Image (cartoon, grey):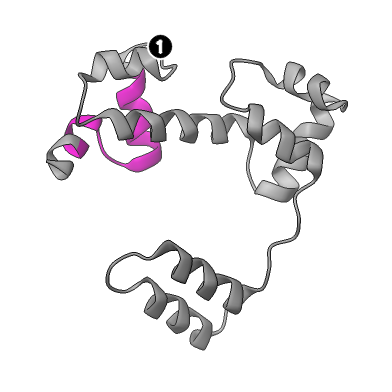
Amino acid sequence: MEHVQVRRLQAAARGELDPPRLRGAVRETLGDAPPLDPRLRQVLDLLDADADIDDLAGAVGISARRLRQLSVQQLAGSLTMLRRWHRLREAVLQIPFHPAADIAARTGFADQAHLVRTAVALGGRTPGSLRTLRS
């Protein structure tokens, strides 16, 4: 990416975070994102369900292998990783309001330790440290 484009994106992100303004700057700088395959969009709507990849693929009429390929090609990552991010996001939103063990159970983690390991692996922080940041 050219230096001018980086500066434009940095300028859009300065100050109070304004997602519409930032999205506009990204679109202006990088152009529109290519459209998602409609089957992948449908799977993303179902992703927070407990269905496994085979079930999700069957729901949209493609093989699990093809679904994995679409995910990597169009989203630059696996559906499993997206599911982990989704669970962690849901957990982080609840941190100020509930104990970590309860949050872990509500958001699909095996236990509190699993939530902590995932938070550190994906976000570099423990849920407890996030609690002190949001207070």
Q: Is residue 46 above or below residue 44?
A: above
Q: Is residue 89 above or below residue 19?
A: above
Dot 1 amino acid type = Ala
Q: Quadrant of residue 91?
A: top left
Horizontal placement of 2 versus 66: left or right? Answer: left
Residue plotted at (65% across, 35% down): 44
> Which is more toward the observer, 125 or 20?
20
**Magenta includes 121?**
yes
Q: Quadrant of the N terminus?
A: bottom right
- Predominant SS along the magenta part: helix
Residue plotted at (48% across, 33% down): 86
Find disc 1 in the rendering and name its residue.
Answer: 110
Q: How far from the left and from the top, in percent, is residue 121?
A: 38, 35
Horizontal placement of 72 versus 92: left or right? Answer: right
Magenta-highlighted residues: 114-130
Residue plotted at (58% across, 78% down): 29
Disc 1 residue crowd, few under 14, some 14–19, many 20+, Cα 10 Å: few
Residue found at the far bottom of this picture: 4
Q: Quadrant of residue 11?
A: bottom left
Horizontal placement of 96 versus 105: left or right? Answer: left
Q: How far from the left and from the top, in percent, is residue 25?
A: 51, 75
> Which is more toward the observer, 98 or 71?
98
Numbered marks: total: 1
Q: Quadrant of the C terminus?
A: top left
Q: How far from the left and from the top, in percent, is residue 61?
A: 88, 25
Which element type, helix, strand or loop, lies under badge 1?
Answer: loop
Q: Quadrant of residue 12?
A: bottom left
> Which is more toward the observer, 112 or 97?
97
Q: Is residue 10 above or below residue 50?
A: below
**Magenta includes 135?**
no
